[in-house]
Image: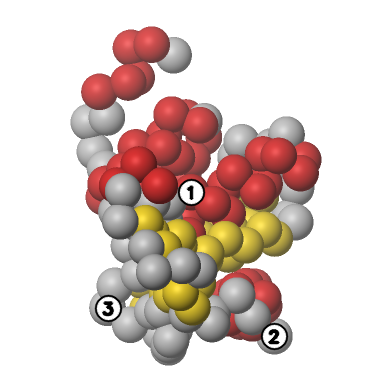
């Protein structure tokens, strides 16, 4: 079992779409991240009718990592719905920005875009010329 299969298996346990209330849905996108120390953290998407209540699975996983360990560096990320990523699986713009603000080392984070072929892309390749470099 390679790291991507391990991360997929851990994250898919979080996939069980549900209505938390008539206004909030959760668990319809899931994510696993591997922290700098090798530990794996998961997250799930939660979306509310009020936009400020919504969080992507990627940010929830990163917040879980930080809350549980104080870590800010992510080595690997996999995100998906009911099936492993195929020609996609990219974090949204808000998540990309969050990861860059969390640690500049996250520019080297590998994002799995195709589970079958194990194709990955680095965050800095999909988010070039980040505006925040001057602050670091």
Quadrant in the rendering for residue 38: bottom right
**Residue 125 seen by the camera:** no
Question: Which residue is nearer to you in this view: 15 or 88?
Answer: 15
Quarter of the image with the N terminus in it: bottom right
Quarter of the image with the C terminus in it: top left
Residue at image mark 2: 1
Relative vertical location of residue 70 with respect to residue 122 in this rendering, above or below: above
Question: Which residue is nearer to you in this view: 101 or 27?
Answer: 27
- Return the x and y of residue 123 as percentages of the image width and height: 37, 48
Q: Nearer the viewer, mark 1 or mark 3?
A: 1
Q: CA distance from mark 1 to mark 3?
A: 21 Å
Residue at image mark 1: 59
- Return the x and y of residue 105 as percentages of the image width and height: 52, 34
Q: Nearer the viewer, mark 2 or mark 1?
A: 1
**Residue drawn at point x = 22 percent, y = 31 percent:** 129
Q: Secondary structure at mark 3?
A: loop
Quadrant in the rendering for residue 22: bottom left
Q: Earlier along the polypeptide chain: callout 2 or callout 1? A: 2
- Return the x and y of residue 13 as percentages of the image width and height: 64, 80
Residue furthest to the top in view is: 135
Q: Nearer the viewer, mark 2 or mark 3?
A: 3
Q: Earlier along the polypeptide chain: callout 1 or callout 3? A: 1
Q: Secondary structure at mark 1?
A: helix
Residue at image mark 3: 87
Say whether residue 45 is left or right of residue 128.
right
Mark 2 neighbour density, 10 Å: few (under 14) some (14–19) many (20 or more): few
Q: CA distance from mark 2 to mark 1?
A: 26 Å
The reply to whether callout 2 and callout 3 are in contact (CB within 8 Å) is no
Q: Earlier along the polypeptide chain: callout 2 or callout 3? A: 2
The reply to whether callout 1 and callout 3 are in contact (CB within 8 Å) is no
């Amino acid at each position: 079992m390679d790291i991507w299969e391990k991360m997929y298996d851990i994250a898919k346990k979080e996939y069980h779409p549900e209505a938390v209330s008539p206004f909030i849905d959760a668990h319809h996108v899931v994510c696993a991240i591997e922290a700098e120390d090798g530990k794996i953290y998961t997250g799930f998407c939660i979306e509310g009718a009020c936009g400020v209540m919504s969080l992507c699975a990627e940010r929830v996983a990163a917040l879980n990592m930080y809350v549980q360990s104080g870590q800010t560096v992510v080595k690997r990320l996999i995100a998906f719905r009911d099936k492993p990523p195929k020609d996609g699986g990219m974090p949204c713009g808000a998540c990309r920005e969050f990861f860059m603000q969390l640690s500049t080392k996250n520019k080297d984070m590998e994002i799995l875009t195709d589970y079958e072929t194990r194709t990955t892309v680095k965050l800095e390749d999909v988010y070039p010329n980040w505006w925040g470099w001057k602050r670091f």
